[in-house]
Amino acid sequence: MTAAAPRPAPPTSYGADEQGLICGYRFIDGAAGVEIDCAASLDSLASASGGNGFVWLHFNLAHAGALSWLHRHSELSEDFYQALREGSRSTRISRDGAAALQAVINDVTFDFSFDPEDVATLWLHLSERLVISARHHPLRSVDRLRAAVKRGDALPTPVALLEHLLSDQADELQHIVRSASDRIDDIEDEILARRQASHSAELARLRRLSVRLQRLLAPEPGALLRVMANPPGWVGAEDKERLRRVNEEFAVVLRDIASLQERIKLLQEEASAQVAEQNNRSLFILTMVTVMALPINLVAGLLGMNVGGIPLNEHPHGFWLVLLLILGFTGLLAWLAMRRLAPRRA
């Protein structure tokens, strides 16, 4: 009997379906989202074209089928695909044509370990009836948004979804700043206590992290203000208020990051000053040791000259007299050095 041929292993899905869809939801009349797939999303878009509600599709770009499905079934602009090709840039929200918004949002990855490289990008397209988001790596903020939708949080408009996502990102950024501030507090206590541990590398890493977070995660204020001043027609007054609140949240976080950078800069200067002080002290000690050895070297050189007239050459105690003279000069120089190194009284 012929053995059955082994069945081919299914292709890796990277946490998504065969089209690269991680999750899809349909929101109608401000109610909780209903989970859908790619096939149902096309029907949902057709049925929602004349009524209320919108569809959110979240894709994994690491899946080979994601981009091909988007090219076939969505009407995304070339600017969106160009943003995908450009990679990670600063977070921004801008107009995409006359009736859509485009957002590039940078977020920290799940395995974030206070490394400046643990930052990835999420791309979004928002229109009146459709929100498409895509990413290469799992991100914390969008996962919090998915969890909120699964719990039944209502998102009445696409801008409400964007506000929820940006608020989660602001919370995550605030958590990172708080954790970094706690570590800076510990380093500050150790530096002010003049402990011998070196924190130069860690301070430089934290400063590089804060600069990268401020540059990548914070939305461009000018772009957001332009969107608020001239939004698409389907963005109402309540949606404008949502964008304004998000802008204020990030303004607070940016102030905290700026304060953190200033603290790190001051600690780096204090640490550098302590290192410079230690180096100067060590150099002074080395110089004084060299000066204290000068009488010994000078007398030894003079007495070692093979010429006549060397003093105390015939004296029975000449060696001890010369030794006493050398010890006297050395003791005098040592007393002057100790007096120089001793802390001065007020």
Image (spheres, grey):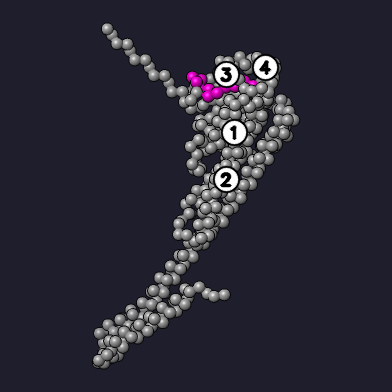
50 is higher (above) or lower (below) than 255: above
Q: What stretch is highlighted in magenta?
A: 17-27
**Secondary structure mostly seen in the magenta stretch:** strand
| Labels 1 and 2 touching (C-beta < 8 A) | no
Which residue has dot 1 on it? 104
Quadrant the N terminus occupies: top left
Q: Residue at x 45, y 59 (%)?
A: 196
Q: Which of 59 and 186 is in front in this view?
A: 186
- Residue 31 can be seen, yes or no: yes
Q: Which amino acid does label 4 sit on?
A: Ser
Secondary structure at badge 4 equals loop
* Residue 312 position within the rendered picture, expressed as x and y whole percent measured from the top left: 28, 91
Mark 3 or 2, nearer chain start:
3
237 is higher (above) or lower (below) than 334: above
Which residue has dot 3 on it? 36
Which residue has dot 4 on it? 49
Q: Which amino acid does label 2 sit on?
A: Arg
Secondary structure at badge 2 equals helix
In screen coordinates, is 266 left or right of 13? right
Q: Nearer the viewer, residue 338 or 101?
A: 338
Distance between the alpha carbons at the discs numbered 1 and 4: 26 Å
In screen coordinates, is 333 left or right of 167? left
Q: What residue type is labelled 3?
A: Ile
Distance between the alpha carbons at the discs numbered 4 and 3: 17 Å
Q: Which amino acid does label 1 sit on?
A: Val
Q: Nearer the viewer, residue 267 or 184?
A: 184
Distance between the alpha carbons at the discs numbered 3 and 2: 38 Å
Which residue has dot 2 on it? 178
Distance between the alpha carbons at the discs numbered 1 and 3: 25 Å
Q: Magenta segment: does it hold 120?
A: no
